[in-house]
Image: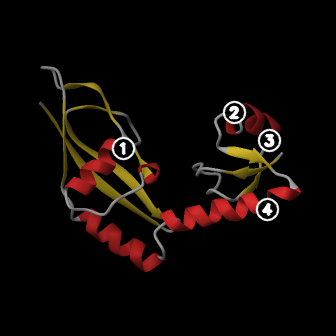
Amino acid sequence: MKLILTTEVTGLGAPGDVVEVKDGYGRNYLIPRGYALLWTRGGEKQIQSIKKARSAREIRDLDTAKEVAGRLGNLRVTLRTRAGDSGRLFGSVTTGDIADAVKAAGGPSLDRRRIEINNAIKSVGSHRVSVRLHPEVSASLDVEVLGS
C-alpha cells in the first residue's frame, strides 16, 4: 500500500514522504489516526504543501541543528508539577510540558513532536529525554521534575 505521510512516524518517515507499507498497517493504524493519506496521482500538490509546512517548522540546516544541540546539552530544565507524598506524580509529564519548560529555561523553542520520552515520566527526580533536531542530529536533555 502506497501512502503519503502527514506527520512524522518514527522509523518510517517524515511528513510529505511517500512510503510503501503493508496493507493492514496502513489501513488499521496510519490512516485512521491521521498519520497518512492514500497515495494518488493527484496527491502531488498535497505532498508539496506538506513539505512546505514542514520546512517552515524544521531547523534549517545541519550546522544550526548542531548549535541547538550544544545549547540543549548545557541547559538545566526544571519542571514543577503536583506529586503525592511518595513522589508519584498526579498524571505524567508530557512532551508539551517539556517544550514549555525548555523555553522558560532560556532555551530554543522546540516542536513538541520532536521530543521523545522513552519511559513515561510519572515520578519526581531526574529524567533523560531525547530531541530529534534534524535527521542526522539528536540531542539528549536532562529534565528535573520537582513535586509541589
Q: Amino acid at mark 1?
A: Gly
Q: Amino acid at mark 3?
A: Lys
Q: Secondary structure at mark 3?
A: loop
Residue sitting nearer the eye, 87 or 95: 95
Q: Amino acid at mark 4?
A: Glu
Q: Secondary structure at mark 1?
A: helix
Color encoding of the figure: secondary structure
Residue at 47% over, 76% down: 62
Q: Is there CB contact under 8 Å for labels 1 and 3? A: no
Can you tell which mark lies on residue 96?
A: 1
Gap between marks 3 and 4, in whole Å? Answer: 22 Å
- Left-right relation of 131 to 147: right
Residue 137 appears at what percent x and percent y? 45, 67
Q: Earlier in the sequence, mark 3 or mark 4?
A: 3
Gap between marks 2 and 1, in whole Å? Answer: 23 Å
- Left-right relation of 14 to 126: right
Circle 2 sits on which residue? 32
Circle 3 sits on which residue? 22
Total tally of numbered discs in the picture: 4
Q: Residue lying at the far bottom in this picture: please name it.
A: 63
Single out the mark in the foreground, 3 or 4: 4
Q: Amino acid at mark 2?
A: Pro
Residue at 68% over, 59% down: 16
Single out the mark in the foreground, 1 or 3: 1
Label 2 neighbour load within 10 Å: few <14, some 14-19, many 20+: few
Circle 4 sits on which residue? 44
Residue sitting nearer the eye, 54 or 27: 54
